Amino acid sequence: MDFGIALALGLLGSLHCAAMCGPLMLALPIPPGRPSRFVAGRIIYQLGRVATYTLLGVVAGLIGKSIYLAGLQRWVSIALGVAILLGFLISKRISLSAPVVRLVTRLKTAMSAQLQRRSFRSLALLGMLNGLLPCGLVYVALAGALAHGTLSAGVVYMAVFGLGTLPTMLGISLSGKLFPLALRLKLRRAIPLGVCLLAGLLILRGMALGIPYLSPNLTSSTTPSCCVAP
């Protein structure tokens, strides 16, 4: 599994995020001064969001590394793929739990406070807080990062996913008319395809069929050296 899937997921997923977070980005505060500060502020906001995704990649990479060392990577990969498919099929029937609602409320309160300020620092914090808001596509990307089984791959995977979201999200924050609603609705139809593709790749990877990159033999690679026959 390469990082092209993470990039494609970011590009397609940002169309969904644009509909959810578009109003917030259009309401971002404008730093006082020259017009160039407006553009710089929007870029800083988006980089703050990507920074949060990258930090989440650290967590996913550490968990994935622990799973890899325990020899459970292939089973976790299959379980993640199945969970993504099930989550995609029943997501509309799932309501947020009370702890998640409280977390979202606290995040929105913190973001509201930053919206009252007009500095680059507040824009960076807004972007980082926005990256923590519950988002199914971010969870899908985290599953892909976790399945790689290494810290570095987890970090890079989430960073690439975040960079994939930049073109659409930055375009919306700079000009709401850059990506018309009709175009976003049409392109969003490709999102389910990307989600199902990643789920299928996770399951295929966990099956350890010996196919390079797609389904490597994870069983042999996780066998401790002390147990290898002479």
Image: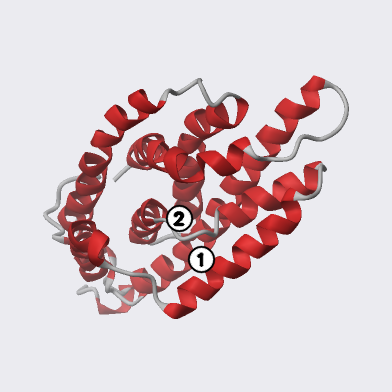
> Which numbered disc covers residue 59?
1
Residue at 51% x, 21% y: name it: 177
Write down the quadrant of residue 129 in the picture. Answer: bottom right
Q: Position of residue 206 (x, y in %)?
A: 19, 61
- Of helix, strand and loop, which one carries label 1? helix
User: Which image quarter is the C terminus in?
Assistant: bottom left
Type of the residue with mark 2:
Gly
Q: Left or right: 49 with respect to 7?
A: right
Read off the residue under disc 2: 154
Give the SS element for disc 2: helix
Can residue 87 be seen in this snapshot? no
Which quarter of the figure has residue 71?
A: bottom left
Q: Is residue 134 left or right of residue 28?
A: left
Nearest the eye: 224 or 177: 177
Q: Is residue 91 above or below residue 121?
A: below
Q: Residues within 10 Å of mark 2 (few under 14, many from 20)?
A: many
Which residue appears at 45% of the width and 63% of the height? Answer: 60
